[in-house]
Amino acid sequence: MPDAAARLHAIQSALADAARVANRVPADVTLVAVSKNRTVDEIEALIDAGQRHFGENRVQEAATKWPELRSRHPDVVLHMIGQLQSNKAEEAAALFDVIHSLDRPSLAAALVKARWNGPTYVQVNIGEEEQKGGVAIGDLPAFLDQARDLQVAGLMAIPPAEVEPSPYFALLAKLARRHGVSGLSMGMSGDYRAAVMLGATVVRVGTALFED
Ligand SMILES: *Cc1c(COP(=O)(O)O)cnc(C)c1O
């Protein structure tokens, strides 16, 4: 079995270094282990190594893996990071503790109806990409106003692939400041250090935690 604990500790120390370089407190950055497509055994190895926050991108997959894991590890915090269909809002509200992918008014309405009151990140289409989910930058003020019945914890984004992500991280941080929200869910395996230097409060790391 590859060493989950060694990978976790390497990433924790890289995150702490990046935070210090940016004159930030390492404890202000939450590492979410993205466990989509990973088995219960792979996940449990990380839990045993001390990891507590996990992210899944599909309601159905989370529903098959997490009730069992949660019964053994009640202090785990589960994050929904993938696109969420409105008709799954109720199931998601029951399964997850945090939602990172609020991206449209109909979903906001469905979550309110499902009595969801956990921390919620508004996903922003930061690269203005046609195929990608997320609220358009220009629509953000109106959207945040529509989402006022939810507990908006911050903004989330996935920058365009294959280009330098830092300008997009900086832009998301600027939008968060402008709109008075403090949380910033940004950074994945390839770019979490840069994200932390630019203000990420949550990084979502999959591959680098689960693969050697
Ligand atoms: C899969 C995924 C991640 C993790 O990506 P890695 O490159 O494997 O670290 C982060 N965020 C979202 C929204 C994802 O779907």
Image: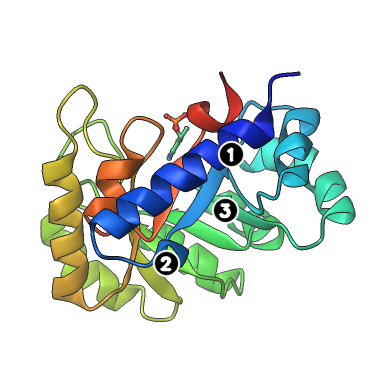
User: Residue 58 vs residue 126: left or right?
Assistant: right
Instruction: In this rendered view, identify the residue nearer to me: 197 or 201.
Output: 197
Q: Check disc 3 and give the amino acid type.
A: His
On residue 28, the disc is 2
- Which secondary structure lies at badge 2? helix
Query: Would residue 145 be found to the left or right of residue 64 on screen?
Result: left
* First reached walking from the N terminus: tag 1 or tag 3: 1
Q: Which residue is mark 1?
A: 8
SS category of the residue bearing label 3: strand
Which quadrant of the view contains residue 20?
Answer: bottom left
Q: Tell me the kind of residue under disc 1.
A: Leu
Q: Earlier in the sequence, mark 3 or mark 2?
A: 2
Measured in 3D between alpha carbons, the distance from the residue under mark 1 to the one under mark 2, in whole angstroms, is: 17 Å
Label 1, label 3: how far apart the Cα atoms are: 18 Å
Tell me if residue 82 can be seen: no
On the image, the x and y values in percent for residue 171 come to: 13, 54
Q: Residue at x 13, y 63 (%)?
A: 174
What is the x, y in percent for residue 183? 35, 67
